[in-house]
């Protein structure tokens, strides 16, 4: 027997097999994941159509705007050197806590008929056994002011911040702590209940978790894939428990309650590179698919060979939502590289029109995200969409393109109920500090003066033109 010949035959079969498998995987990824880019020069951006009763709104979050949030996880984080760009702190922020009436009027003037805001848990419940009635009265006034201005309030219970005492008990890493969040939500609901028709339980569990436990840019600044999975599961369980317990309370059947999901797509920088595709596949699994699947099936699972394997059944999660909130900004281009510490990176294409955040203007991705989230078969509120643009030279284009994509998604059958622009007034952008200017209104930090940006007129015009009712 000619051993050499046999070895050669085995080797070449393996090689051909390997190459075939490689090519098949590559083509399958490419076929299933097109990355559309529309020819904007042939698109009429005024060709818009939205549901008649769609809500046009603006969104903000307590820690980023209120000021005086000094008893939560973020104020602790801000105090640590090097955590926030240029050592910025949220401080008195936009003084929204005292200026909410002014800002509600500004939102109305900008064409908004709905206002998404969050409550600061650490102010309402500064200690586990203390409930602050004055703070409660404050939020009651804020909600009343929105109604008085003819606006629909949408309240978020958890937008990245929680009381220090909650973290001291182990925070979201400990499943037993979910009960504190449920009790807090129940208490607030018993006070505000049906005064607020739209309730968001948790803002962007995937951003909160990956930034806090994988990238390390948010508190607690860890890098641990297993904790990412565990915290995500705890947050989804918290959402489910809050949803079902509020639904059983008086007024629960009169309000709509939902989770807010961020979608960023992960597209390969090089469509011919299988490693880039594989990285995208796993990033998407952790950030998007694990959550979307869990919301549909009640089964949460994250599995990345050699890194993490985690699964958990989450009781009644598949029936926990009257709507889904979608936050959409952009997509990422992923590039794999030979590095043990950083095997992949997010890269911008030179051809991309960049925003001040490291994101491209990519309205086609908004359309993709809307079609994808529609698979949950729930009404969709776009709870956040906006651009960081200090020069205000891309905002108009961004708004017009993204609203065109929204209109197209609605025409394609997505059950769109509302659109909330992020954000009303420039605010504290987490680890980027005060550098990112997402506001329809520019904020002068010295005088607290707010000025409508010219580029924001695109939102004002479109919202006003498509609003369901006039004064
Ligand atoms: C968050 C906001 C943030 C915005 C812009 C979203 O992920 O919910 O709090 O300001 O993105 O980066």
Image (cartoon, helix red, strand yellow):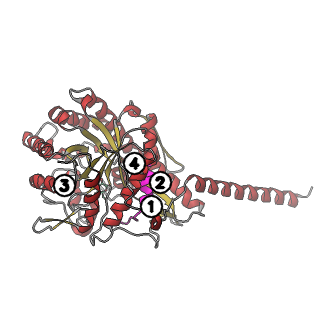
Q: Position of residue 442 (x, y in %)?
A: 20, 66
Instruction: Determine which residue is flagged by label 1.
Output: 332
Instruction: Determine which residue is flagged by label 2.
Output: 283
Quarter-of-image position of residue 80: bottom left
Query: Would residue 120 be found to the left or right of residue 272 on screen?
Result: left
Disc assigned to residue 436: none
Disc assigned to residue 228: 4
Q: Quick check: marks 1 and 2 in contact, CB under 8 Å?
A: yes
**Residues rendered magenta in the picture:** 356-370
The tag earlier along the polypeptide, 2 or 4, is: 4
**Foreground residue among 386 and 219:** 386
Distance between mark 1 and mark 2 Cα atoms: 10 Å
Residue appearing at x 17%, y 31% in the figure: 190
Residue appearing at x 46%, y 72% in the figure: 351
**Foreground residue among 97 and 116:** 116
Residue appearing at x 14%, y 34% in the figure: 191
Q: Position of residue 184 (x, y in %)?
A: 20, 37
Q: Can I make out residue 206 in this image?
A: yes
Q: Can I make out residue 340 in this image?
A: no
Distance between mark 4 and mark 3 Cα atoms: 36 Å
The tag earlier along the polypeptide, 3 or 2, is: 3
Instruction: Determine which residue is flagged by label 3.
Output: 107
Q: Residues within 10 Å of mark 1 (few under 14, many from 20)?
A: many
Distance between mark 1 and mark 3 Cα atoms: 31 Å
Tell me the SS state at disc 2.
helix
Which residue in the rendered view is the most extreme toward the left? 134
């Amino acid at each position: 027997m000619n051993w050499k010949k046999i070895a050669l035959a085995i080797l070449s079969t393996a090689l051909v097999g390997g190459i075939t498998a490689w090519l098949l995987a590559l083509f399958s990824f490419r076929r299933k994941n097109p990355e559309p880019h529309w020819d904007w020069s042939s698109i009429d951006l005024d060709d818009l159509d939205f549901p008649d009763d769609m809500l046009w709104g603006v969104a903000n979050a307590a820690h980023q705007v209120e000021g005086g949030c000094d008893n939560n996880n973020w104020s602790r984080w801000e105090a640590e050197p090097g955590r926030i760009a240029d050592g910025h702190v949220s401080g008195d922020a936009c003084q929204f806590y005292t200026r909410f009436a002014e800002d509600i009027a500004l939102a109305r003037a900008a064409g908004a008929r709905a206002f998404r805001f969050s409550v600061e848990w650490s102010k309402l419940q500064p200690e586990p056994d203390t409930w602050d009635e004055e703070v409660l009265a404050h939020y009651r006034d804020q909600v009343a002011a929105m109604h008085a201005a003819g606006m629909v309030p949408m309240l978020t219970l958890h937008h990245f911040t929680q009381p220090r005492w909650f973290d001291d008990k182990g925070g979201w890493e400990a499943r037993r702590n979910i009960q504190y969040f449920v009790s807090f939500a129940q208490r607030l609901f018993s006070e505000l209940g049906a005064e607020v028709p739209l309730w968001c339980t948790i803002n962007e569990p995937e951003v909160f978790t990956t930034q806090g436990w994988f990238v390390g840019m948010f508190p607690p600044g860890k890098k641990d894939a297993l904790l990412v999975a565990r915290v995500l599961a705890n947050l989804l369980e918290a959402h489910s428990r809050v949803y079902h317990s509020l639904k059983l309370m008086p007024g629960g059947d009169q309000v709509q309650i939902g989770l807010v999901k961020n979608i960023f797509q992960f597209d390969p920088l090089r469509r011919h590179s299988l490693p880039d595709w594989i990285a995208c596949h796993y990033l998407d699994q952790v950030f998007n698919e694990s959550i979307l699947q869990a919301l549909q099936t009640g089964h949460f699972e994250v599995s990345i060979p050699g890194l993490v394997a985690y699964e958990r059944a989450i009781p009644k999660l598949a029936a926990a939502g009257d709507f889904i909130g979608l936050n959409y900004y952009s997509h990422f281009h992923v590039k794999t590289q030979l590095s043990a510490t950083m095997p992949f990176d997010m890269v911008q294409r030179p051809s991309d029109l960049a925003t001040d955040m490291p994101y491209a203007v990519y309205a086609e991705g908004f359309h993709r995200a809307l079609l994808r989230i529609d698979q949950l078969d729930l009404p969709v509120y776009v709870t956040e969409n906006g651009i960081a643009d200090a020069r205000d030279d891309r905002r108009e284009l961004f708004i017009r393109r993204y609203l065109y994509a929204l209109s197209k998604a609605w025409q394609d059958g997505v059950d769109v109920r509302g659109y909330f622009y992020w954000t009303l007034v420039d605010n504290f952008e987490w680890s980027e500090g005060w550098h990112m200017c997402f506001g329809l209104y520019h904020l002068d930090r010295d005088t607290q003066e707010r000025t409508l940006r010219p580029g924001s007129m695109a939102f004002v015009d479109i919202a006003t033109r498509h609003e369901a009712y006039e004064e």
